[in-house]
Amino acid sequence: MGKGGRTSEPTAQQKAADNSLEWKSPYDPQAKDAPELPTKGQIKASIPAHCFERSYIWGMSYLIRDLIIAGGFVYATSQVLSTDIPTDASGLAAWVFGWNFYAFWMGTIMTGPWVVAHECGHGAFSPSQDWNDVVGFIVHQALLVPYYAWQYTHAKHHRRTNHLLDGESHVPSTATENGLGDNHERLSFYAVYHEAMGDGAFAAFQIFTHLVIGWPLYLLGLASNGKLDHKGNPLEGIPDHFRPTSPMFPEKVSFKIALSTATTMASLGALVYAGFEYGFLPVFLWYCHPYMYVNAWLVLYTWLQHSDPSVPHYGDGEWTWVKGALSTIDRPYGIFDFFHHEIGSTHVAHHLFHEMPHYNAREATRALKAYLGPKGLYNYDPTPWYQAMWKIAKTCHYVDSTEGIQYYKSLEDVPLTKDRKKVE
């Protein structure tokens, strides 16, 4: 029996079960009647074989579709908006609204090519990995993503999904790390902020830090990283995505990491040059502001598809690849599914078989639901994504430890005393 809270008090999953209006994962690995998990081969056999077929034509057609939509939107915007700031109040209000409208929708549109480039990294874009890397490198570097570095760490995210030690991105912090144990006198800044702000304000702070600054902090190695280096040793130093000597990467990929970093720096340099040539306000309006929404979307997906108080995380002794992959959650995203190639509503299929192209993932998801659903192993939360985001921001803060089976807990359930409110 794994550790993680099925002894003296109800777990987060059991608490969720008491609320009929709140979704909970149907799979409880600690339940006496927990189903036997199928093998990866058995799961794959439930999906039609043609779903794994990759096509140069279909892969390129979706990328071209996205770029045509983006180009058309840029042209339409250029016909109705100017980068010159109006001097009258009404004109200024319309100008601010117009450019914010453009930023949101352009960022939403360009998340589509981001997802396609991400598929290139997985080998799902076409039958040729060389072609995948060419396309993925160009698209991701244009969006300031260090392609090869992120390709490497994201592959680890798939290999070790919901592993409490060796996972990658959105790895939960522990009670000890937050200073919540009886033997800890100093609280982490995270716990202090929650106590000072209160539940609602802290949830808003969580959303801001994830969606606005989360992506650059992650790339810089300052947030949401795993706890082990590429050798499996406790992490030492800053696990950034830019240095070939970062503890994230083995020596064999050093050249690729350096190439990604050099190209990212060149892209940034081009933006600075454009700023001096055409003005920094136009560069911000046309590129930087939409770029922030692209980042927000990609962090939102990773956050929401793997986080819920009823979804387990596993320590070394409990984790298996199938357990981790089946801890993924599908969610509905409405119109955004069209722009983002259904990456959020077919994420279970994506995590089980990342080499599958997105245009076959919907059919594969139907097959997975038919196979895994009756076993209680398919996670689909029908809660609107913005409501799910608020719930997760309020309830998914830490786990007890990195051992056994753990569920997210909320800081609102932890009584803190004023004499302990000191930041580590």
Image: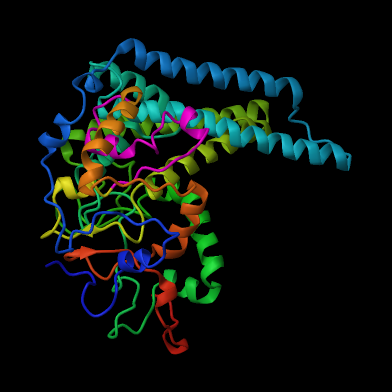
Q: Residue at x 37, y 68 (%)?
A: 18
Q: In this view of the protein, can residue 265 be seen by the observer?
A: yes
- Magenta-drawn segment: 328-357
124 on left or right of 339:
left
Q: Please identify the residue farthest to the right as the structure is shown.
A: 88
Identify the image's colour scheme: rainbow, by chain, secondary structure or one colour: rainbow
Nearest the viewer among 72 and 225 is 72
Is 45 situated above or below 235? above
Residue 279 in the magenta stretch? The answer is: no
211 on left or right of 420:
right
Is 246 situated above or below 100? below
Quadrant of the image containing the N terminus: bottom left
x then y, percent, for residue 176: 28, 74
Q: Please identify the residue farthest to the top as the structure is shown.
A: 57
Q: Main secondary structure of the magenta part?
A: loop
x then y, percent, for residue 397: 39, 65
Is 93 situated above or below 132? below
Nearest the viewer among 162 and 145 is 162
Is 229 situated above or below 95? below
Quarter of the rendering containing residue 97: top right
x then y, percent, for residue 395: 42, 64
267 on left or right of 245:
right
Quarter of the rendering containing residue 351: top left
Quadrant of the image containing the C terminus: bottom left
x then y, percent, for residue 375: 20, 47
Residue 329 in the magenta stretch? The answer is: yes
Number of disc labels: 0
Q: Residue at x 17, y 70 (%)?
A: 3
Q: Please identify the residue farthest to the bottom as the structure is shown.
A: 419
